[in-house]
Image (cartoon, helix red, strand yellow):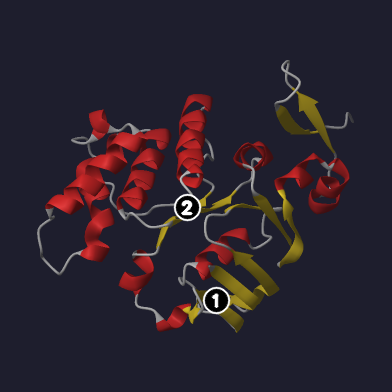
Amino acid sequence: MIEADRLVVERLGRVVLREVSVRIGDGECVSVIGPNGAGKSTLMASLAGLLPIAGGAVRVNGTAIHQLKRREIARQLAYVPQIHDGYMGFRVREVVEAGRYAYLEPLAALSRQDREAVDEAVSVCRIEDLLDRRVVTLSGGERQKVWIAAALAQQTKTLFLDEPTNALDPAHQVDLIRIMRDFAGAGRTLLVICHDLNLALALGGRVVALREGGMFFDESADVLQDTDRLAALYGTTFEIHRGRDGKSLSIQFQIEES
């Protein structure tokens, strides 16, 4: 279990998260939504132990996260941020192999178990034809699959993804949703930050909503069908559309004519 208990985080002298408490149980799928600047990425980075906290606590299986070494955390939790600054000159194979470094001694070669983990991650993300290319040559969707493959190679029970489908074309979005559903469907823990409410709807599970650094609601994904709640969260109006099958749903915000 990963838990934030009355978490307070400050960045550049400004309080970004205010007394936020949330528990993510083993095997849960949780989407984090909210307006820009609500504190979503800060919450995820804090839960991963990547930011100092000004108050409250973050615990992993009951242990304060600041008491754990980064290698211990990396064996329990894989994190894919929204923006990657490095690895552009590396080949895809090298990036995915980097996901195994939490298990390796310095300068040690990959073991057979490491290579099997890498091969499995490559297969899940369907990036076999990219392995010898450098990351800088890839499209945005291809890069995202590579980052996720590196995270899957860590073989953790928990995966954090910050805006995984942002600015991707529909085909890449569908492929990434498949990967996320398969991960969660295997009984592992998935935490995803979503600007696209339809991604949260597709994943199901729970939805945690933040607004102005505080908790707005923490409920079943069914809450996404409550357009009044969404309007209160985002300050704009929404409508729900049903597919031809009568079962599939999509959420759209409404644009008022001037």
Return the residue found at the far top: 244
Closer to the camera in the image, 161 or 195: 161
Give amino acid for label 2: Arg
Residue under the image location 24 percent in, 46 percent down = 118
Q: Earlier in the sequence, mark 1 or mark 2?
A: 1
Please state which of the two labelled residues, at mark 1 or mark 2, is closer to the viewer: 2
What residue is pinned by disc 2?
188
Q: Residue 147: percent from the left, percent from the top?
A: 36, 47
Cβ–Cβ below 8 Å for labels 1 and 2?
no
- Mark 1: give few (<14), some (14-19) or many (20+) Cα within 10 Å: many
Q: Residue 26: percent from the left, percent from the top?
A: 52, 60
Disc number for residue 67: none
Residue under the image location 9 percent in, 58 percent down = 109
**Element type at mark 1:** strand
Image position of 160 with respect to 73: above or below: above
**Element type at mark 2:** loop
Q: Residue 71: percent from the left, percent from the top?
A: 31, 71
Q: Quadrant of the C terminus?
A: top right
The answer to whether 12 appears left or right of 219 in the picture is left
What residue is pinned by disc 1?
58
Q: Residue 188: percent from the left, percent from the top?
A: 47, 52
User: From mark 1 to mark 2, how far is it between C-alphas?
Assistant: 20 Å
Give amino acid for label 1: Val
Residue under the image location 35 percent in, 36 percent down = 125
